[in-house]
Image (cartoon, rainbow, N blue to C red):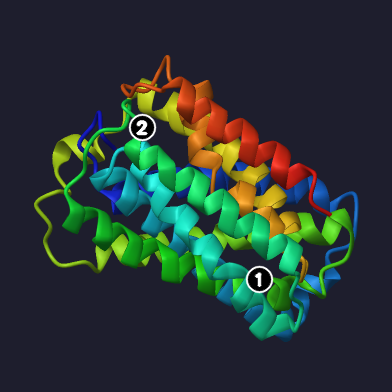
Amino acid sequence: MGYRKGNLLVVNFINNILATILAMVVLIVLQHVVSLDFLLLPQQWFRIIIYALLVQLVAYGYSYLYRHLPLIDAVISGKISDLFIPLALAFTTSYFSFKQYSVSVISTLLVGLLAFSPSTKKTNFKTWVRGILVIVPLLTIQSAFSPLLVDRIHGIPELMGFTIITIYLRLVISFISLFTRPKNKLINKKSMKVGKMVVGVYGLRSVLTIAAQISFTIATSSKTSGIAWVLLNMTSLYGVVFGSWILKEKIGKFDVLVLLVVTVMTLMTR
């Protein structure tokens, strides 16, 4: 979005088109291997629709962050939700772990220190607050209801079918969002232009979208998923560290140290 000056609705729409094409191929193959009769149940479709809506809203939320904030600030904004996610899970699943919540709080404080890192760009405070108000409620709601929506999905085949249908619905949601929106100056010919390079990049991203969606569904399907969110909300920071040679942002030693400490601390929590 930064390089092409693209609108978040356009970016999500293009990505979802290519991901849906790939998902269609996977579904055709999957139908010849296992039975997907569970997808015919009305209650499952209701769950999938709600789940897909939450996933796509969070995708829009992160797109907003990436469009308006440096990646480090986007990471910090999303990480703040870890202060509320365990409490939200306790409300919907009646499960709460003081040990896991301690990790959520400590890791959030550590990531918050990145705001004072010399390598971090200074962001307008009001812009930062708007980003926090966008992403934190979305992540908290998604984390709270994900276990309830996925708890009746059993086995890899059903999970694959659930994920693929989720991707289909994300395309429908992104299509409606893009083409029912009032005239927007950010949706211009440049942002909508699709060339070979764009197809190649988004093609790779569509593969990662499906893989990430499956992994994400597994990670957030349990009532104990609060600890998984500690790492999930830091995926952008992993991207900054390992992809800093591509991204036009600097990464400092302190940033890497925080990433390592939080990762080790989270993996040691059971």
Seen as rendered, the residue at the extreme top is 245
Where is residue 231 drawn, in percent x and y? 63, 47
**Which is more toward the observer, 268 or 44?**
268
Residue hosting label 2: 117
**Which is more toward the observer, 83 or 239?**
83
* Mark 1 closeness class: few <14, some 14–19, many ≥20 residues within 10 Å: many
Residue sitting at x 72%, y 61%: 100
| Residue 234, quarter of picture | top right
**Which is more toward the observer, 30 or 260?**
260
Which quadrant is the C terminus positioned in?
Answer: bottom right
The three-letter amino acid code for the residue at tag 1 is Ser
Gap between marks 1 and 2, in whole Å?
34 Å
Residue hosting label 1: 146
Residue sitting at x 50%, y 31%: 239
Where is residue 65 drawn, in percent x and y? 32, 50
**Mark closest to the chain's N terminus, 1 or 2:** 2
Q: Is residue 162 visible?
A: no
* Mark 2 closeness class: few <14, some 14–19, many ≥20 residues within 10 Å: some
Where is residue 149 drawn, in percent x and y? 69, 76
